[in-house]
Structure formats: structure tokens, C-alpha cells
Image (cartoon, rainbow, N blue to C red):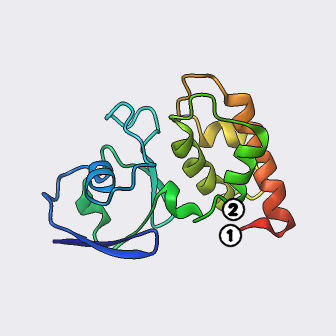
Amino acid sequence: MISFSVNKRPVKVDVDPSTPLLWVLRENLELTGTKYGCGMAQCGACTVHINGQAVRSCVAPVSRAAGKEITTIEGLSPDLSHPLQRAWLEIDVPQCGYCQSGQIMSAAVLLNEIPNPTDDDIDQALTGNICRCGTYPRIRRAVHRAAEMMAKGGAR
């Protein structure tokens, strides 16, 4: 049994410790907001937080989660009230939407570390998150908008 916390809820899973965290989240815990993209940590669709750090869950063994706090897109807020989620909707970022949970999770770490990021900060922090639809300009605008919301007390 591997014990950890997901979205502030304690869980125990009886799986092979080398099973990718992505599959445990999606298949065992039914948290399907985290997406499978490439399976090689190259696209960012599977990004989650482990103790507040962005991690590609497709290559992270579930054993890495033992005793730690995992946050998925579902745990960012229960009602889409997180400033990033609100900004994503306001700016109408998603086209196909497949990469968006990974983009948002990477952006959340950025805003925790740099509350008022520059375009370069955003580009650098999200460089490994691929958007096949090319919504990068809207993503950048949404991160800036979320930073504004957070500065005005909209942080969760």
C-alpha cells in the first residue's frame, strides 16, 4: 500500500510502486482532469503538483508520491474559482482544451514563485507545455490576468 494525499484527501493505493502516478490518478482514483499526452514528459498535459512543485505524472512513479501532497487540476479549486481558472474562462483560452489542465498547473507554480511574472517568465515556466492549437498568446494573457486577480486579493 502506498499512502499519500490527493487534493487534501488521504488515499491509499495497492499498486505496483513503479506504476506512473498519472495512471493511478486517472484509473484508481478516477481523477481524469490530468491528461495523457506523450508518455515521455515532453508535452506537459499530465502536469500535477507534488508538494507544490510541477511534476510530469506520466513518468513519475507512484512511489514518488508516498507521504506527499498531490494536487491535480480538480484540487486547484472545487468550483473553478481559482484565479487561473477564472482567467482561463475570461480570456477564452481553450480551443481543443486537451493541454489546458497541464498549462494551468504549471502556471499555478509560476504564480506561487513569481506573483507578477513577465512574458519571459511565463514563456520559460510553460516552455515544456505544448499546445497543439497554438493558444500561447491567450495563455500568456490569462496568466497575466490571474496575477492581477491574485494581487487584488483573489488568491485561493
Residue type highlighted by circle 1: Arg
Q: Is residue 118 visible?
A: no
Q: Residue at x 79, y 46 (%)?
A: 144
Q: Secondary structure at mark 2?
A: loop
First along the sequence among labels 2 and 1: 2
The front one of 125 and 62 is 62
Residue type highlighted by circle 2: Ser
Residue on which disc 1 sits: 156
Q: Quadrant of residue 94?
A: top right
Q: Give me the C-alpha separation between circle 2 and circle 1.
A: 8 Å
Q: Quadrant of residue 30?
A: bottom left
Q: Is residue 108 above or below residue 1?
A: above
Q: Is residue 110 above or below residue 39?
A: below
Nearer the observer: mark 2 or 1; the answer is 2
**Coordinates of residue 101 in the picture (x, y in percent):** 53, 45
- CB contact under 8 Å: marks 2 and 1: yes
Q: Is residue 73 visible?
A: yes
Q: Secondary structure at mark 1?
A: loop
Query: The N terminus appears in which quarter of the rendering?
Result: bottom left
Residue on which disc 2 sits: 81
Q: Residue at x 84, y 55 (%)?
A: 148
Which mark is on residue 135? none
**Coordinates of residue 13 in the picture (x, y in percent):** 21, 67
The front one of 112 and 80 is 80
**Is 62 on the left or on the right of 78, as rendered?**
left
